[in-house]
Amino acid sequence: MSAARPAIADRIAIFDPLSTGTTWQRRRSLAVVYGLLSLFAAYYLLPLGVIVLNSFRDMAEISRAGLIGLPHSFSLQHWAKAWGTFCVNGACNGIAPFFYNSLWMAIPATIISTAIGAINGYVLSKWRFRGSETLFACMTLGVFLPGQMVLLPWAWTLGTLGLTNTIAGLVLIHCVQGLSFTTLFCRNYYVSIPDALIQAARIDGAGFWRIFRKIVLPLSPPILIVTVIWQFTGIWNDFLFGVIFSSGRNQPVTAALIALTAGGMSVRQYNVESAAVLIGAMPPLLIYLFGGKFFMRGLTQGAVK
Amino acid sequence: MSSLLIRDLCKSFGSVEVLRNINLEARTGEFIALVGPSGCGKSTLLAMLAGLESVTHGDIEIDGRIVNRVPPKDRNIAMVFQSYALYPTMTVRENITFGMESRGVSKDKQTEALARVAGLLQIGDLLGRKPFQLSGGQRQRVAMGRALVRDPALFLFDEPLSNLDAKLRVEMRTEIKKLHQRVAKTTIYVTHDQVEAMTLASRVAVLHKGALQQFDRPRAVYERPANMFVAGFMGSPSMNFLPAQIVEVGGKLAVSVQAGNGTPALLPLAGAVGGATRQVVLGIRPEHFGRFTGIGNPTMGVIEASTEVVEPTGAETMVVLRAAGSEIIARFEPDDAPGVGEVVKLSVDMNKACLFDPGTQVLLN
């Protein structure tokens, strides 16, 4: 509740370790720092660059000049084909249906797992009870369990519930699998909300839900943004559960991309495949572009500052 | 009639006993200060009154109703927190009306109560602001407004001034007193600052190690402290303690303190202490020393001391002296204070002196 202070990110920007020393020393240090950073950035971005370029090139040109090369022709038709008419899994509707599958899976799962995580975090930080710390430790354990380990239990669960090969089944998996993370994020954030606020609200006559809605939730946007970005990216990019528990028309886009290349019969169409991969990767990228700064801020910010 | 009655109240956290057999009573309209050093249990006691901590043993009665198991919202109390605990995302107006909204008070009544409190605390022009846009003193006012807007049986204050700077603290102290005189609500005020307790309270409860040491009017606590802890805690600088002996001289009892040169100094004994010659601890407040002018009276003792440190504060000068083998602090008028190294004859107002049992530390006279 203290007066507005610069966020940590701003404070880091103010600190300049290269601000002392002779001009020559400073220039040399800057050159080394920027040189190395540029090198690694190029290294990481190169595959993305190749894919982007290929998505605009003609098949003839790719087979003539190889996968790596600057486009001599430029066409958006591969993108259109990848989206709407390319044949995947025996149907020629492009990857659009699978893209929508992913949306139908990722959006509800993100919302539900974040909402439950926020409530869990609220209870585990502000309404502690005997054993709540142990419970929290058990939930956090889920963060460290590899997905491969839970494949069989999930297969049994989905089978029992009749949700095998459905989007709803994948939503359920991602909700449960995401709870460890969302609870951990929210609980650790809510711990920094002073208990006196909750006590004051209780004396003011507010109950469990009213305190959550009126006091805790309004303080939550930083951590909710972090959790939503984390969950959406993780769920959208998930491949394991998608490829194991869905098939045919019900696959999310990540799993369908494999089917796209595994058609086998015809000649590989690298340009269309590139465009399809880029379409499939687009939503997390967009979320990161628009929400990235909130993400960084949320991770470094306390609740009441 | 009393608004608050505490009977044999005990609190333990596991095997740790935090409060032992507390008995307190606040009459309607009274201002009770709970004072004690950190860790004495005063904040725990307040939290128990508020319903934020459970009762291990004993009873809390508010307005004639035992509330041991009643949740905070149904206890008819209002509380001001040390950190103010203003809801950070709400405006001042929303902070103050939150409680009424939770209780389903009609909009008209809310507006009316808000206007009354805003006028009382002069925060009318702050109503649209968020807590982070307020200064410490303003936050303090809003926190009080949030409590005042209700009409509770009991006001609870948890060290409300400890986050303010020294000057503001004194101003707000006066304002709290004015406010209490105007609204005349029963108030329980927790503080570790004995000056706050003395200035505000109609009665002071001194707590130490989870036990109530004394519960009385401020002057009584100051002048006749029940034991050496209270005597040392209340008053700044603290009361001076000198090892002494009760002796019989010429058929009359006197207090003998060992002077520096080996010869005992005899001080007249005012009032009975029950029993003759015995060891005692003589307690004298700094202001009950003075420079001996040569004119004595039957209740005045005289003792010689050498000046070691002189601490002027402006209005008065505190002087550390060595007398009777102990270090003592005496208060002087600035013009009258001795210089360092000076040997002075001090008069001691034995009427005001306290005698304690060296074993039990309890007041004897």
Image (cartoon, rainbow, N blue to C red):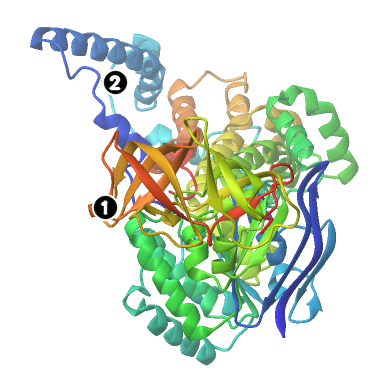
Determine whether B301 is above or below A234 in the image: below
Which mark lies nearer to you, 1 or 2? 1
Determine whether B306 is above or below A32 in the image: below
**Quick check: marks 1 and 2 in contact, CB under 8 Å?**
no
Res B39 seen here: no
Q: Which residue is mark 1?
A: B336
**Residue appearing at x 64%, y 38% in the figure:** A184
When asked about the image quadrant of residue A257, the answer is: top right
Please state if A216 lies on the left or on the right of B345 as rendered: right
Q: Residues within 10 Å of mark 1 (few under 14, many from 20)?
A: few
Q: Nearer the viewer, residue A97 or A81?
A: A97
Chain that bears disc 1: B
Q: Tell me residue B338's x, y (percent).
A: 28, 44
Q: Tell me residue B109's x, y (percent).
A: 53, 90
The lab-note entry on whether marks 1 and 2 share a chain reads no
The three-letter amino acid code for the residue at tag 2 is: Pro
Q: Where does the N terminus of chain B fall, quadrant-wise?
A: bottom right
Q: Tell me residue A173's x, y (percent).
A: 74, 39
Res A62 seen here: yes
**Residue appearing at x 68%, y 66% in the figure:** B50
Determine whether B313 is above or below A182 in the image: below
Q: Which residue is mark 2?
A: A71
The three-letter amino acid code for the residue at tag 1 is: Asp
Determine whether B216 is above or below B183 in the image: above
Q: Where does the C terminus of chain B fall, quadrant-wise?
A: bottom right
Q: Tell me residue B139's x, y (percent).
A: 41, 64
Please state if B198 lies on the left or on the right of A91 as rendered: left
The residues tagged by marks 1 and 2 sit, at their Cα atoms, a distance apart of: 99 Å
Which type of secondary structure does the marked residue at label 1 adopt?
helix
Q: Nearer the viewer, residue B146 or B347?
A: B347
